[in-house]
Image: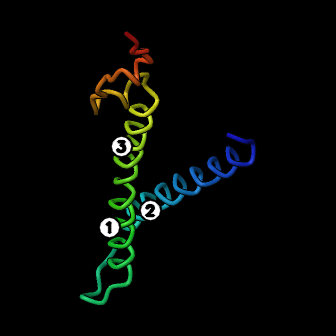
Amino acid sequence: MTKINRTIALVLAAIVFLTVAFSLCVIAVEAGHDCHGEDCAVCELIEACEDHIKGMSLIPVLLSLMAALILLRALPGGTRAFFCRSQTPVSLKVKLTN
């Protein structure tokens, strides 16, 4: 991984962390507000923050799936376990002379 890719990954991780932290802070601060009915802007904001946090909970699942696929591919013999190669004289490089 190049230095630029690491920097980009770090910045994206920081952005995700900060947005989740901001959403949690908004929910904590506005939890006891005085609701004004169905069209309450604060309730809509809290609901949007909750949806954002629920959407971010899918990220660890996707990352673990990607890590599992990478490890499966990187293991020695990992790809050979899925199929059986038949052995022929040509594949064994046997010279058939009488």
Disc 1 on helix, strand or loop?
Answer: loop
Q: CA distance from mark 3 to mark 1?
A: 39 Å
Q: Residue 94: which quarter of the image?
A: top left
Q: Which mark is residue 32?
A: 1
Q: Give above or below for 13 relative to 95.
A: below
Q: Tell me, yes or no, whether the two marked residues, 2 and 1, touch with CB atoms within 8 Å.
A: no
Circle 3 sits on which residue?
65
> Colour scheme of this structure image?
rainbow
Quadrant for the C terminus, please. Answer: top left
Task: Give x and y (percent) for residue 66.
Answer: 41, 44
Q: Nearer the viewer, mark 2 or mark 1?
A: 2
- The kind of secondary structure element at disc 2 is helix
Q: Amino acid at mark 3?
A: Leu
Residue beneath the point at 58% across and 57% down = 15
Label 2 to label 1: alpha-carbon separation: 15 Å
Do callouts 3 and 1 mark residues in contact (Cβ within 8 Å)? no
Q: Which residue is mark 2?
A: 23
Q: Nearer the viewer, mark 2 or mark 3?
A: 3
Disc 2 vs disc 3: Cβ atoms closer than 8 Å? no
